[in-house]
Image: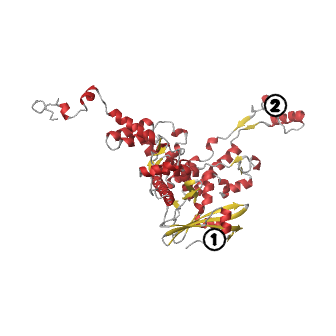
């Protein structure tokens, strides 16, 4: 059953997607707007948010609201590990010569960025070229990190294949536009749009009907929270499209792909990695800010003088400025002692006794435990974490929990991308039956950075032990090299391994007869029957 769009508001979104906006603000550090204790301190003038109010907003003291945004590290650490591990995307199919020739007849020049699959201006593998173009049109190399972060913060990510004047590509969307149908046979993507200074709700629908996939575009005029559907002709005009409905024969599932985070039966759309962390984040900020208030009031040094000195200072100030409150610090250079031998004193409390940073560290540790984040991963952001050199194995065990979490995300993300590429190729196949539908292979690199020396030694051992091919060894030793360079390097290595000397050039390469000097086991010359 489809969704009936009668109203659209923030409440409509949160009924399906929960506190998605709250978790985005939590990640971005907008904590002063989220936590009641912080708002109360700002209102009372105890603290000031420098970003929103400026220092003039404080009434009693000038202490800023201190934010130690642990909620930012939790999604970014797995994003850092997973994004750097995604390598090249390659087709598992080699196009036929006829397909390549047909493609070369249609284009007279190399498309920029396709040198890996071309030779002398000609396409050598059409299938690989098409995958490269999808990757380039989608700007995929720039999207991996942001995709993982958004997936972690929101609790889900939407991927949509498109084929229009911008080319065949994949668009990635935030989860709050995604509305699945209750019978699981379709999905709506809802966008709030402004056209000619008017507010509209644009709904793109995909639904399985009678074994085929039907897509529709709907446009609703927004009047406050109310939705009024427009006629088909007006929808076409405002959206600048020719048709609002299309049918894809034989397609039994939607093109739109949704990737949930930590999906369960209770939360089929996934949950944010920051779920239930707001209380601990508030306490961390509160503790640090409270320490700042105490220091502001008591940590600064103060000067204590006797009554006689203060009286003398006031008299000097009155004579000089006409105001005894304007005490000049220069007048303190000459002082007198009282009857007991006391003069002015500098008073300052021991600031090392202020606050309880151990409590903050305990809260941070608890957040890391609940979100499967290694404490050592945070140490890499600190000076103490980068001092001593570590091998890749040592780093692996230090980051074990984070890597286990990242490996699961990596596997899900690769599957997510493969489904989207397959859907793009399905669209391309509809226009050109020569395009083959496949799930491309995605090369994976190490999540943990290691030295080039360790990288080469590791691959050489695998190659020498026979568990890794020469091609794989060259690829892993040179992860950023082009496909053309890799193939040339493999050829050079194979040629150099065929060592020719004078004897082999004259007598041919060594065989069993050469080693026995062309004699049989009794030492008699072997006659050449030829």
Q: Quadrant of the C terminus?
A: top left
Q: Position of residue 336 (x, y in %)?
A: 79, 30
Residue 331: which numbered mark, if any? Answer: 2
Between 21 and 211, the residue placed more toward the observer is 211
Between 316 and 75, the residue placed more toward the observer is 75
Residue 457: which numbered mark, if any? Answer: none
Q: Secondary structure at mark 2?
A: helix
- Disc nearer the start of the sequence (2/1): 1
Residue under the image location 12 percent in, 30 percent down: 525
Q: Position of residue 79 (x, y in %)?
A: 52, 50
Q: Position of residue 294 (x, y in %)?
A: 68, 47
Q: Quadrant of residue 349?
A: top right
Residue under the image location 55 percent in, 74 percent down: 1
Label 1: how many Cα within 10 Å (few below 14, some 14–19, many 20+)? some
Question: Marks 2 and 1: which is nearer the front?
Answer: 1
Q: Which residue is mark 1?
A: 5
Between 148 and 34, the residue placed more toward the observer is 148
User: Is 398 above or below relative to 35?
Assistant: above
Furthest residue toward left: 522
Q: Position of residue 363 (x, y in %)?
A: 55, 52
Between 130 and 100, the residue placed more toward the observer is 100
CB atoms of marks 2 and 1 within 8 Å: no
Q: Secondary structure at mark 1?
A: loop
Residue under the image location 19 percent in, 31 percent down: 515
Color encoding of the figure: secondary structure
Furthest residue toward top: 502
Label 2: how many Cα within 10 Å (few below 14, some 14–19, many 20+)? few
Q: Quadrant of residue 505?
A: top left
User: Can the viewer see residue 90?
Assistant: no
User: Can the viewer see residue 254?
Assistant: yes
User: Is 173 above or below relative to 493?
Assistant: below
Q: Quadrant of residue 20?
A: bottom right
């Amino acid at each position: 059953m489809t969704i009936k769009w009668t109203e659209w508001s923030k409440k409509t979104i949160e009924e399906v997607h929960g506190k998605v906006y709250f978790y985005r603000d939590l990640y971005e550090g907008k904590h002063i707007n989220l936590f009641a204790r912080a708002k109360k301190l700002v209102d009372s003038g105890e603290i000031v948010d420098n970003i929103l109010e400026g220092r003039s907003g404080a009434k009693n003291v000038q202490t800023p609201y201190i934010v130690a945004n642990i909620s930012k590290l939790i999604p970014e650490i797995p994003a850092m590990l997973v994004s750097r591990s995604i390598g090249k995307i390659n087709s598992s199919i080699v196009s036929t010569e006829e397909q390549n020739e047909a493609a070369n007849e249609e284009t007279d020049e190399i498309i920029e960025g396709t040198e890996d699959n071309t030779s002398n201006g000609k396409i050598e593998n059409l299938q690989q070229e098409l995958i490269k173009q999808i990757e380039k049109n989608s700007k995929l190399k720039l999207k991996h990190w942001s995709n993982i972060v958004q997936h972690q913060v929101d609790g889900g990510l939407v991927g949509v294949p498109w084929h229009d004047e911008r080319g065949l590509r994949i668009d990635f969307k935030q989860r709050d536009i995604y509305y699945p149908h209750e019978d699981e046979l379709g999905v709506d993507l809802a966008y709030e749009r402004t056209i000619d200074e008017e507010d509209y709700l644009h709904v793109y629908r995909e639904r399985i009907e009678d074994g085929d996939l039907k897509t529709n575009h709907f446009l609703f005029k927004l009047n406050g929270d109310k939705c009024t559907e427009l006629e088909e002709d007006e929808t076409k005009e405002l959206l600048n499209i020719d048709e609002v409905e299309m049918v894809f024969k034989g397609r039994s599932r939607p093109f739109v792909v949704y990737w949930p985070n930590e999906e369960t039966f209770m939360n089929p759309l996934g949950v944010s990695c920051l779920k239930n962390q707001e209380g601990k984040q508030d306490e961390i900020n509160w503790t640090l800010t409270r320490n700042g208030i105490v220091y502001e009031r008591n940590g600064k040094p103060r000067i204590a003088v006797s009554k006689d000195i203060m009286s003398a200072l006031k008299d000097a100030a009155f004579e000089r400025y006409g105001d005894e409150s304007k005490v000049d610090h220069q007048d303190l250079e000459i002082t007198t002692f009282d009857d007991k031998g006391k003069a002015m004193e500098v008073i300052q409390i021991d600031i090392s006794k202020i606050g309880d940073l151990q409590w903050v560290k305990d809260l941070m540790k608890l957040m890391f435990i609940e979100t499967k984040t290694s404490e050592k991963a945070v140490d890499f952001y600190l000076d103490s974490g980068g001092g001593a050199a570590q091998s890749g194995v040592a780093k692996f065990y230090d980051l074990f929990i984070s890597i286990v979490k990242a490996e699961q995300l990596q596997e899900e993300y690769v599957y997510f991308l493969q489904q989207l590429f397959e859907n793009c190729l399905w669209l391309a196949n509809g226009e050109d039956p020569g395009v083959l539908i496949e799930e491309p292979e995605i090369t994976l690199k190490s999540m943990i950075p290691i030295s080039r020396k360790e990288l080469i030694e590791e691959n050489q051992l695998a190659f020498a032990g026979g568990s890794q091919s020469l091609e794989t060894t060259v690829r892993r030793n040179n992860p950023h090299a082009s496909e053309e360079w890799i193939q040339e390097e493999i050829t050079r290595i194979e040629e150099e391994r065929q060592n020719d000397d004078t004897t082999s050039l004259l007598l041919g390469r060594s065989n069993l007869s050469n080693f026995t000097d062309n004699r049989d086991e009794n030492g008699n010359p072997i006659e050449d029957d030829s």
